[in-house]
C-alpha cells in the first residue's frame, strides 16, 4: 500500500463519525463481526481492515456458524484493499454462499472501499452503497513476485494488465464497459482515481444497484467523533 494512499485514508478516517469509540483502522489488521438480524433471517458479516490473510477464513467460519439459520447474507465492507490472493480466496467463499443464500454487499456512510475491496463488493447480487462512501481505483504496484495487488509497484503504465483485471472482476458483475474504458484511461498512467458513491451512482455504471442515503435516522445512543487532527482560526469561532 503506497504511503500517500495510506495517509489519505487515515485522514479521512479521523475526520468522520465512527461507530464506536475504538474504531478499527481500515488499513490495519482486519476483523469480522457477525450479527443475525431480521428475525433470524439475515446474517450480517461486518469486515473492517485489510483484505489480507484471514478474511476468507473468518468469512467462511461466520457463515458456517450461522448459515443454516438464515436465508440471506450481508457482507459490509470498510477496507483500503489488500492482497489479490486473499481477495481471490474471499471470492471463492462468496461463490459458495451464493449457491444457497442471497448475498448483499454493503459499503456504508463514510466507509471506504478501495483496491481489492472493490471486486469483493461486486460479488454481491445486490450491491448497496452510501452516496457518501469513498472509493479508490488504481493499477497494480509490484514489489515482489509473491506480492498482492497492493504490493505491486511499477513505473510503466500497462493498460493491457489493467484491462484484463477489469475484464475478470468487473465485467461479470455487469459493470458498464463504456465506464470501464474510461476507468482504464484514468488509472493506467496515474497514481489512482478517487470517486464517491454519488459519483458511481450518477455515472450509471451498474457498480451500485441500491443507494444508502446520507441522512441517518435518529438513534437513542451517543455518536462518537474522532478527535480533530488540528484546529486553526477557521474553527475557533
Image: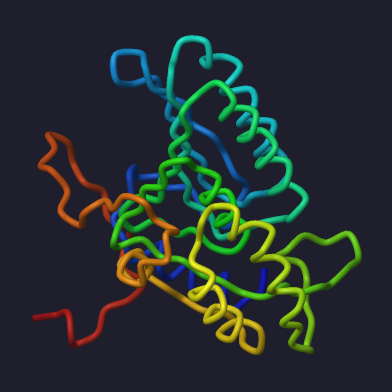
* Position of residue 64 in the picture relative to residue 107 (left or right): right
Residue pictured at 72% horizontal, 47% vertical: 88
- In the rendered view, tell whether residue 70 sits above or below residue 221: above
| Residue 159 x/y as whole percent | 72, 82
Residue pictured at 8% horizontal, 81% vertical: 237
The quarter of the displayed image where residue 104 is located: top left
| Residue 131 x/y as whole percent | 29, 61
Residue pictured at 63% horizontal, 34% vertical: 95
* Position of residue 87 in the picture relative to residue 124 (left or right): right
Q: Residue furthest top?
A: 69
| Residue 154 x/y as whole percent | 79, 82
Q: Nearer the viewer, residue 70 or 236?
A: 70
Q: Nearer the viewer, residue 77 or 2?
A: 77
Q: Nearer the viewer, residue 207 or 6?
A: 207
* Position of residue 7 in the picture relative to residue 110 (left or right): right
* Position of residue 49 in the picture relative to residue 60 (left or right): left
- In the rendered view, tell whether residue 86 sits above or below residue 71: below
| Residue 225 x/y as whole percent | 27, 55
Residue pictured at 66% horizontal, 64% vertical: 167
Amino acid at each position: 500500500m503506497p504511503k500517500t494512499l495510506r495517509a489519505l485514508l487515515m485522514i479521512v478516517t479521523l475526520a468522520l463519525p465512527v461507530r464506536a469509540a475504538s474504531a478499527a483502522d481500515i488499513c490495519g489488521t482486519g476483523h469480522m463481526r457477525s450479527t443475525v438480524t431480521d428475525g433470524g433471517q439475515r446474517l450480517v458479516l461486518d469486515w473492517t481492515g485489510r483484505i489480507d490473510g484471514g478474511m476468507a477464513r473468518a468469512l467462511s467460519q461466520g457463515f458456517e456458524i450461522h448459515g443454516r439459520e438464515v436465508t440471506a447474507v450481508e457482507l459490509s465492507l470498510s477496507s483500503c484493499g489488500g492482497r489479490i490472493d486473499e481477495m481471490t480466496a474471499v471470492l471463492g467463499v462468496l461463490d459458495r454462499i451464493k449457491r444457497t443464500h442471497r448475498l448483499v454487499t454493503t459499503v456504508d456512510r463514510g466507509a471506504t472501499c478501495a483496491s481489492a475491496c472493490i471486486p469483493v463488493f461486486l460479488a454481491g447480487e445486490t450491491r448497496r452503497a452510501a452516496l457518501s462512501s469513498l472509493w479508490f481505483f488504481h493499477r497494480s504496484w509490484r514489489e515482489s513476485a509473491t506480492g498482492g495487488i497492493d504490493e505491486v509497484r511499477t513505473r510503466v503504465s500497462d493498460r493491457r494488465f489493467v484491462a484484463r483485471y477489469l475484464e475478470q472482476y468487473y465485467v461479470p458483475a455487469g459493470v458498464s464497459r463504456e465506464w470501464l474504458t474510461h476507468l482504464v484511461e484514468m488509472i493506467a498512467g496515474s497514481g489512482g482515481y478517487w470517486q464517491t458513491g454519488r459519483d458511481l451512482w450518477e455515472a450509471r455504471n451498474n457498480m451500485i444497484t441500491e443507494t444508502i442515503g446520507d441522512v441517518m435516522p435518529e438513534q437513542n445512543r451517543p455518536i462518537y467523533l474522532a478527535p480533530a487532527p488540528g484546529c486553526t482560526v477557521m474553527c475557533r469561532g
